[in-house]
Amino acid sequence: MKIPTMLLVLGALSSSAHAAVRYVNVNLTSGADDGSSWDNAYRSVDGVSRALTAAVSGDQVWVAKGTYEPTSGTTRTVFITMKTGVAVYGGFAGTEATLAERDHVANATILTGDLSRNDDGTTTNFADNSYHVVAATGVAATAVLDGFRVTGGYANGATASNYDKGGGIIILSNGQPTIRNCTFIGNRCTFGGGAGYVLSAGGSFTDCDFIDNLGGSYGGAFDTNAGAVTWTGCLFRNNQAARAGAIETYGVANRSITNCVFIQNRATSSNSGGAVWSGNSATVTVRNCTFVANTSATTTGAGYLNTGGTSNLANCVFWNNTGSNGSTTNNQVTTSGGTTTVTYSLVQGGATGTGNISTTPLFVNLATYDLRLQQQSPGVDAGNSSLIPTGITVDHDGLPRRVDIVATPDTGVGAPVVDMGAFETQVPPPPPCPADVNGDGTVDGADLGLVVGNWSGSGSGDIDANGTVDGADLGLLLSAWGACP
C-alpha cells in the first residue's frame, strides 16, 4: 500500500520536533535542574544518567566538565546506560551553542565508578565502586559516547551476572555502541576486561586511550568473547592481566585493530601474550600498529600470541617486546595454534612473510616512547598501501596516512607507499627561506659554496628536496639572492 507523501512529511517533522539537546552541568548551584538549557542543566552527580533516562532517539546529551557518577547513591549495580539513537558528548565548558565549540581535552569530563570518592591511587578502596561505569546492552551503533574519561570501575561481583567483567564498560546482547575520544583509565575486574568486556556483541572504539587498567584473568584492557570489535587510532599503555596484557580475542568473530599503539602492557601467567592474545577460532586483522616494550611471563608472544584462530598482521612494527626467556623473534609474534600471517612489517629478529624487515626502526625517541619514525627509518615508505582498511585516511596522530618521503627509497607497494607502524612520517614544512642553506638569514656566497660543494650529492644544498643537488637548486639559490624576507 502506498503511503501519501504528506503523511511521510508530517512523520518526519514530528520525529525532528522531538529531537532535543539535554544539558548536564554538575558545577551549577541554581536553575530548574531539568536539562532544558545550560542555565537549567541537570546538576546532580548522576546528571548523565538522568539525561539518558529522559532522552529519546535523536536526542543529544551535552555534558560540561566535571565528575559524574552512575547514581547519586551507593548502589554498585547502577550504571550509565547508553541508548540507541542517543549521542552523549563530554568536553563542554557549559556555555557552548554548537557541538563544534567544545574542547574535550581542555574540559575534562569524567565518568567515575568511585561512588564514595575514596580512591586515592595508592590504597585499595575499590570494594564500594560500581561494577561497571558504562553499560551498552543491545544498543545500535547510533548509541554514542564521545569525549569522556571513564575511571574507577571495579567488577569483582558475581560471575552469573557478569559483575566480574568490564570495569569501565560492558557490552552485551549484540550491543554495537560507538565510542570516540574517550580515555579508560584505572578500571579493574577479577575475571576479564579491566576497561571493557564484550560478549556476543561488538562496537567501535576510535581515538581512545586505555591506560593503567587491570583485567584479572583475561584482558587488561579488553576481553572479547565472540565479540566483533574494531579499535582505530587507540593507545594501549600499562594495562595488565594474567593472560592478554591489553586485548584478548576469544571465540568466533572478526576483530580489527588499526593505527593503534601498544606500550608496556603486561601478561603475568603462562600462555599469556603481553599485548594481544588470540584464540578459540578468533579472526583478527591488525594493520599499521606499533608494539613496543610489552612483556610476557612466558617465553613467547610478548607482542602478539595466537593460540588458535586466524590472525593477519600487516604494516606493523614489533620492537623490544620481551618474555621471560624466549628468542627475540618469538617475543615479538608467536603462533602456538591456528594461522598467523605477517607481511610488510618490521619485526625484531625477523619474521617469515612477504615484505618483512628486521633492521632497527629508528624511532624519534625510544627512551620516551616517541614511536614516530625518523625520515631515514627503514620502515618509511615500506608498507603495502593496498592492505590499509577501507576508509582509513589518517594515522594515529590524525595526519595523512600515505605520504611520500622523496629522499627515502620506496621499498613497499602502492605509491604513495604507506609507512610501517601507527605513525606516518610527514614531509617537514619548508623553511621560510629555503635557499638560505646555512641559515644565517642571507642567501649569499656561503650558500653558493655549499651547493657547489655538494653538487650531485644529497646533503646541504638540496633546496628543492628532490634527493640531488643540481641545477634546479642553483637556480633557486640565484633567484633568492640577498637578505631573506
Image (tube, grey):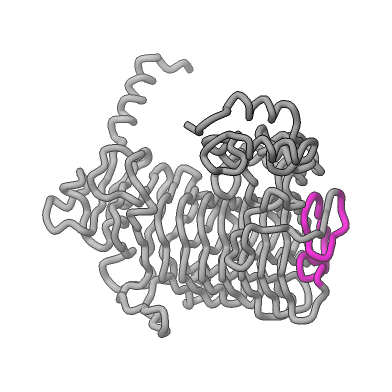
The residue sitting at 39% across, 14% down in the picture is 5
Q: Is residue 348 magenta?
A: yes
Please name whichever residue, 245 or 330, is drawn nearer the observer in this view of the structure.
330
Q: Position of residue 155 (x, y in %)?
A: 47, 73
Relative to 14, 234 lies left or right = right
Q: Position of residue 277 (x, y in %)?
A: 70, 66
Tell which residue pokes out farthest to the bottom in this image: 123
How many numbered circles are shown?
Answer: 0
Q: Is residue 255 visible?
A: no
Left or right position of 320 against 123: right
Given residues 426 and 270, the one toward you in this image is 426
Q: Is residue 376 magenta?
A: no
The residue located at (40%, 49%) in the rendering is 83
Answer whether residue 356 is visible to the viewer in this image: yes
Residue 50 figure quarter = bottom left
Report x, y in % for residue 280.
74, 64
Is residue 316 left or right of 326 when viewed as pictured? left
Image position of 410 (left or right of 163): right
* Residue in front for this viewpoint, 80 or 195: 195
Q: Position of residue 436 (x, y in %)?
A: 58, 37
Residue range highlighted in magenta: 328-354
- Rendered residue at 25%/47% (across/down): 23
